[in-house]
Amino acid sequence: MNMKYLGCSPVDGSSTFRVTITPLFDDQGASSISIQQTLDQPDCVAHEPLLLFETSYGNVPAYHFTEDNVVAFDDAGSLPVYFTNKKSSNSSDQEWRVKRNTSGNVVLQFVVFPRNLDITTPMGPRVDMRRDQGGLIAVGR
């Protein structure tokens, strides 16, 4: 998963964030990861991009997020997030935008599941998350 914090106009001039990754388990071992990402006071204006999400790398698709499986909030409460395609004609990247101005820190929460693979999955760069021997394996992309 490659996500770039666009930072909007941070109050203190920095664009920092914190990420907490928690593995989730089923009867076969690690099954997914829960992610909580905190953006420090991004001071983002409604309908401006907050994050840029790379939807694929080579022929390997990134995890498919929808607005329904991303929960966001800030100091003012629930923060509706929506996705748009980046305004470049040859880019498949998504811009994650907020429907109102942000207040204080922004927290995003979501769960990522490993990619389902089978004999028909094309070869490509190993940038996806996969199940492996009871655990999960992925690169930091």
Image: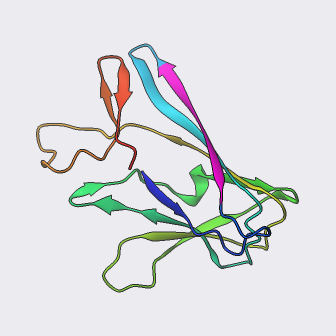
Residue 130 rendering spot, x and y as whole percentages: 31, 34
Residue 61 rendering spot, x and y as whole percentages: 30, 55
Q: Looking at the picture, does residue 41 appear above or below residue 136?
A: below
Which image quarter: residue 56? bottom left
On whether residue 23 falls in the magenta region, the answer is yes
Residue 87 rendering spot, x and y as whole percentages: 45, 84
Q: Please give the name of the residue rendered at 21% of the width and 59% of the height, measured from the top-left corner.
A: 59
Residue lying furthest right: 76
* Horizontal side, residue 6 vs residue 86: left or right: right
| Residue nearest the viewer, comparing 116 with 16 | 16
Q: Looking at the picture, does residue 78 appear above or below residue 111?
A: below
Q: Please give the name of the residue rendered at 58% of the width and 59% of the height, measured from the top-left corner.
A: 67
Q: Looking at the picture, does residue 33 appear above or below residue 82?
A: above
Marks counted in the figure total 0
The residue segment tinted magenta is: 16-25
| Main secondary structure of the magenta stretch | strand
Residue lying furthest top: 27
| Residue nearest the viewer, comparing 52 with 81 | 52
Residue 49 rendering spot, x and y as whole percentages: 60, 74
Name the colour scheme: rainbow
